[in-house]
Image (spheres, rainbow, N blue to C red):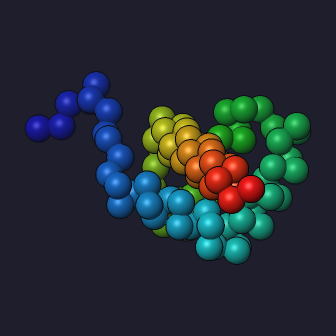
Amino acid sequence: MKWPWKKRTLSFDEAAKFNWKLDTNVELRQKLDELAKQYKNLSEKEYRRKLLLLFRENGLVIDSNQLDMLLLLRHKTDQMLLSREADNDEETT
């Protein structure tokens, strides 16, 4: 039985698919750029609705909470990679 108050967790595969789509799907990136340009003319609710719709159109069926988690994971991963890169640069100089 599925309990309505339980949040659906994200699998590693879903997170990887999200990152892969953002990194490789040129059409999705162009549409995200176009949506970003409309940001100041939209309410936050409308912006997020359109953002989720873009992802669904590209095979990523996620809800708002999952989007927040995926974006946070992506941000933290970028921070870790940049930190590691900076450490490697310091070692070579």
Q: Position of residue 55 (x, y in %)?
A: 57, 58
User: Considering the image in quadrants, where does the N terminus appear?
Assistant: top left
Q: Position of residue 25 (x, y in %)?
A: 63, 73
Does any portion of residue 71 appear in the rendered image?
no
Q: In terms of image quadrants, where is residue 42?
A: top right
Q: In terms of image quadrants, where is residue 48?
A: top right
For image coordinates 35% across by 55% down, the residue present is 12
User: Considering the image in quadrants, where does the C terminus appear?
Assistant: bottom right
Horizontally, is 26 left or right of 79 in the view?
Answer: right
Does any portion of residue 22 appear in the rendered image?
yes
Residue 93 to residue 4: above or below: below
In this view of the protein, which residue sits in the foreground, 46 or 33? 33
In this view of the protein, which residue sits in the foreground, 87 or 80? 87
Q: Position of residue 60 (x, y in %)?
A: 48, 60
In this view of the protein, which residue sits in the foreground, 26 or 93? 93
Residue 65 to residue 52: above or below: above
For image coordinates 72% across by 65% down, the residue present is 29
Horizontally, is 16 left or right of 28 in the view?
Answer: left
Residue 85 to residue 41: above or below: below
